[in-house]
Each structure stands twice: as structure tokens, then as C-alpha cells.
Image: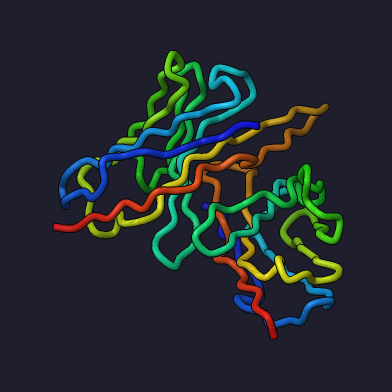
Amino acid sequence: DIQMTQSPSSLSASVGDRVTITCRASQSINTYLNWFQQKPGRAPELLIYAASSLHSGVPSRFSGSGSGTDFTLSISTLQPEDFATYYCQQSFTTPYTFGQGTKLEIK
Amino acid sequence: QVQLQESGPGPVKPSQTLSLTCTVSGGSISSGGYYWTWIRQHPGKGLEWIGYIYYSGITYYNPSLKSRVIISVDTSKNQFSLKLTSVTVADTAVYYCAREARAFGGHTVKNYFDYWGQGTLVTVSS
């Protein structure tokens, strides 16, 4: 299975900050990388697909980049509703696998 | 707007079979290009992909669960279902159904989970 490793595991930031989350795959996955946001008690929601494509309805402050094994999710100006847990997921090959998550907390 | 909703009988005892159904509304499960998926999340943990089914009945399962999983589809009811046999307490999790969309363009495909059910907690306990 392809292992997905996110860093950091947790992150404290303030409203208005710019934050970046990193995801590394254990082998090359081209750009088959998706990002999800999950809030407590809710299902994950798709933010970014194919490494850099913004899903419909997602604010433009979210952006993704990378290819091969290294990827980043950036949030340009944190809003109160952005404090949540973020997961990367590889869709290159089955079994699809997820990162362990990055919990973004209010400083 | 596509919506997915999980349903199931509730707690399960060890060694029994976990059964869940996902009802799809706002779109036909028989539409091509979509793979109907089960994903689970252990309490306070990350996400684990269980497997998918295409409307034609083609399935693919996570090898780690393959010997215990059956995913089936009922296109007449616009539903798909999950059965997980011989459960243990380690199978206690929130179970989500989701839609995997696949968009083909040239030599590439973009595939992602674009719609999810709200999730249902299944507790395995004696």
C-alpha cells in the first residue's frame, strides 16, 4: 500500500494567518492527490482534487500544489471556519490511502 | 444535488455480520463514471478505504478486509450495501458511504470522493 504522511500532525494559527500543510507519498503518485477538510461530527469534504484543482464551491483561499511524492495544501488567509482537521488522500492506485490528518487549531 | 444516507440496524455483537445500506438521492446510481464507495473512520483516528462497486456490479475491496467484505448494489432502489462478516471490536468505527467520481481527459483521469453520507457509528460490543 502507498503510505501517506502529513506534517505537521497539529498546527496552531490565528485568523488571518497563512498556513501550509505538507503531504508526502511513499512512492510517486503523479498528481493523484486529493485534500479533504473534516469538522467534528461531520463527514470529510473535498477541497482540492488532482493536486491543484479547486472543488466547486470551495473558497479561493485554499490552494494545492505538488506532484510525484510531495504535495502542499495552503490556506492564504485563515478564517474562523477553517479550523478543522485536514487529510490528504492518494487516488493513484487501490487501496486508496489517506494521511493521518493535520489538526488546525486556533492559537 | 446528490445526497447519500447510510442506514443500518445498530450495534453488532462480535463474530456477527455488520450490514449497512447507502441510499442515493438526487442522481441515479446507474450513471456511468461513478464508483460507489465505503470508507470507515475508527474513533479519533484516520480514514480507511473499504472498497467500491460500479453500477454494473464490478467491485474492488481493500486487501486488508477483502476476505470479510461484500459490497452489493440494487439499482432499482438506488442503493448500495456493505456487509462485513466476523466482526470484532476493532471494526467499531464511523462508516461512510461516498461517491468516487472519475473524469477522463486525454491520458489522465481525475478521481476523487465528491459526495459523502453523514456517517453512521457502528459499535461492536458483546
Q: Position of residue B50 (x, y in %)?
A: 43, 44
Horizontal side of residue B66 vs B117, given as left or right: left
Q: Give me the residue at 23% from left, 55% from top.
A: B124
User: Where on the picture, by quarter, is residue A79?
Assistant: bottom right
Q: Give me the residue at 56% from left, 30% from top.
A: B35
Q: Is residue B30 above or below residue A65?
A: above
User: Where on the picture, by quarter, is residue A76?
Assistant: bottom right
Q: Nearer the viewer, residue A20 or A80?
A: A80
Q: Position of residue A1 (x, y in %)?
A: 51, 52
Q: Tell me the colour scheme of the image.
A: rainbow
User: Where on the picture, by quarter, is residue B84?
Assistant: top left
Q: Position of residue A33 (x, y in %)?
A: 70, 50
Horizontal side of residue A72 vs B118, given as left or right: right
Q: Is residue A107 above or below residue B103?
A: below
Q: Give me the residue at 42% from left, 18% from top.
A: B77
- Residue that lies at the very extreme toward the bottom in this rendered image: A107
Q: Give me the residue at 66% from left, 74% from top.
A: A104
Q: How many marks?
A: 0
Q: Position of residue A94 (x, y in %)?
A: 54, 42
Image quarter hosting the C terminus of chain A? bottom right
- Residue that lies at the very extreme toward the left in this rendered image: B126
State whether residue B69 appears in this view: no
- Residue that lies at the very extreme toward the top in this rendered image: B76
State whether residue A24 appears in this view: yes
